[in-house]
Image (spheres, coloured by chain):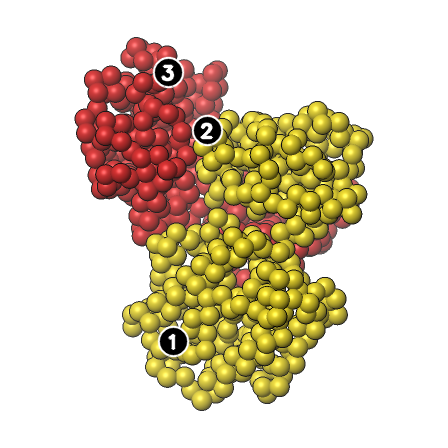
Chain colours: A red, B yellow
Amino acid sequence: MNPPYDSGKLDRLMDEAGVDLLLTNTQHNARYLTGGYFYHFHERFDAMGLGRYMALVGIPKGDPGRAFLVGERREIAQSQDQGLWIPELITAERQPAAAAQAAGEAIKARGLERGVIAVEMDFLPASSMDVLSKALPGARFTEARGITESLRAVKTPEELEIFRRITQDDAEIIGEVFTSAAPGATTRDLARGIEDKMTARGLHFLWVFTCAGNKMLRAPSGKVWEPGEVCHLDAGGSYEGYLTDVCRMGVRGEPSKLADELFQACLATQNKVREEIRAGAVCGDLYESGFRHLADTGHGEYGEFIIHGVGLVSHELPRFGKGFENKLEERMIVSIETDIRHPEVGYVKIEDTVAVTADGCEGLGDLGRDAWYIA
Amino acid sequence: MNPPYDSGKLDRLMDEAGVDLLLTNTQHNARYLTGGYFYHFHERFDAMGLGRYMALVGIPKGDPGRAFLVGERREIAQSQDQGLWIPELITAERQPAAAAQAAGEAIKARGLERGVIAVEMDFLPASSMDVLSKALPGARFTEARGITESLRAVKTPEELEIFRRITQDDAEIIGEVFTSAAPGATTRDLARGIEDKMTARGLHFLWVFTCAGNKMLRAPSGKVWEPGEVCHLDAGGSYEGYLTDVCRMGVRGEPSKLADELFQACLATQNKVREEIRAGAVCGDLYESGFRHLADTGHGEYGEFIIHGVGLVSHELPRFGKGFENKLEERMIVSIETDIRHPEVGYVKIEDTVAVTADGCEGLGDLGRDAWYIA
């Protein structure tokens, strides 16, 4: 079977990095490299008995036909049912040392025991690294992140369709929760509402930041959303590992004049940056532009501008910062956030997700971004 | 503030293991050591930007007043709102190397740079281990698991109350899903039903093993639950990190004579083992007893008996195996499973959870264990 990702691009990335074999152990990279396959039992937890479950995916440069997945025996039937493309599923005990031992043997069997192996140093456990180093004393280990995040950076049309749908879901759900919030509802109640509605739509709820009033506590809590208070719902979930991340504003009653000024400042900043997004735009320019537009509103003092890529990892490529020279490409997914933490009004924020196009950007889930939800 | 766990016991365990400081990085141990506090944003995902979030909890032996938590700045308000007992919250970038550097400095500040540091080798990333080793060249690093799982093994009355409630919820939900399964429902539909109902009750859905008919595919799939087929639902979820794990049987129509014989064999095995559970019972004896009772039913050929502890980790202490001499203690939580994989009938299984008492055990969530659910 053919790999579901761009195999030529992976080979080039590995070649540029001088890497002979890619060995990942995170769920996000396993999902990407398998084309969505992951052992269902361990999608949401990994600690088990004397160790933990890890899916180790190994791909030799230029030779995906010799790729392997170290998993465990109970997933064999699922891998067959889902038509896993990886030709060898190696089963091991659910212990990082055992999984690493199996991976080491698979690497030797491919003649790469003296090669350069790229691993995820921030995720591969110390016990696995120790076993791998001893099993492959002639190998050199290097960081895999640059390779994997470059591989994932430009989304396929199929991935883009997932982002369209889940971001729209997220925006609709936030609107429903704001407008149905009962008097006396706490921020924890609002968060529960988001979780219930995400689950009903087949999303996996991940988080809500929410803050009612001006105390700046953004964790769901027993705080009641009181009349007159502004409130934001910044909610994230996932579908087959892909993330959605949207923020909208609500108010109980009517926003004060100042609150609405802050809201309009966020919206203007967002809109101006969105006008500048297109394939070829320089990430450092967009970053500085966001802060400049925010300052131009006259409400920069308490404000912050954040812009980041989204995918299977939050804040993945493209990256933005002062002086960054990297450029946007078509079908990159970008989150744009303007936050104003005003000591009197509270936390005012809009977060949008867009897909980069040749001559601009497509707003994903734009519902409700340009007005207050009134509860 | 006082630690929420048995501080005297932790000191004894660290003393026996020759450990000067416990440094954990898993969510389950962070929750246990903080008494339930965990940064809400990262309860369900950790990968972020150039690294990941980790909560590193450090506790010096005999000196919980100098405990520390390495987290990040956005959780300060939540830690104050929830009254985190740990006196020092150290904020770091969400990168395992940065978090480890901060932990290394905190360990030096406590004069333990030449001490024995217990870490979770199967969870601490290689990059963190590397930084810690360099920051503390005079320290010795050892495995923390023995200490943390012994500390957690006997549950408090408050923890027991959580297990009572969530196991009962799990059993009720499984019954509701079986009896409301529409004609033509797939095992994926059944799994979605479990997830929806767990979410509605405030549980975090984790997994369903389910198998309709005799093909032994236990992953949720497009397989339709056909008339005459047996089906099991082995469903797990969590509440504040505590796990529930229950399996019940259903059939479309009536079970065949053979299917019912297998079911009764599972039930008899479970019942006999439950009669032998009490504080002081030897874990190796219970393990062998389960297989013996199963064999006595005449249906041992395709059967398996499994018994394991449950808590914040699946298959935690107490552990069971041939010849194991460890003994049960009051308020340990034990899962008991009898599986028969019959080539004609399919997968027949009952899984119960019990709490060990002085003279027996208390069944948790026993609803529906002794009869088929008819769909």
Q: Residues within 10 Å of mark 3 (few under 14, many from 20)?
A: few
The residue drawn where x is 37% and y is 73% is B225
Question: Quick check: do tags 2 and 3 share a chain?
Answer: no
Task: Tell me the tag on residue A36.
Answer: none
Q: Nearer the viewer, mark 2 or mark 3?
A: 2
Q: Position of residue A332 (x, y in %)?
A: 40, 33
> Residue under mark 1: which chain is it in?
B
- Look at label 2 and name its amino acid: Ala
> Is there any visible trace of residue A17 in the rendered image?
no
Callout 3 and callout 1 share a chain: no
Which residue occupies 66% across, 43% down? B7
Disc 1: which residue: B373
Callout 1, which amino acid?
Tyr
Residue B303 drawn at (x, y percent): 58, 78
Left or right of residue A200, residue B205 in this image? right
Q: Secondary structure at mark 2?
A: helix
Residue at disc 1, secondary structure: strand
* Residue B147: percent from left, percent from top: 70, 48
- Location of mark 3 (residue): A302
Residue furthest out toward the bottom: B257
In the rendered image, the vertical position of residue B363 relative to residue B63, given as above or below? below
Residue nearest the observer in this picture, B324 or B186: B324
Quadrant containing the N terminus of chain B in the rendered view: top right
Residue A244, quarter of picture: top left
Secondary structure type for disc 3: loop
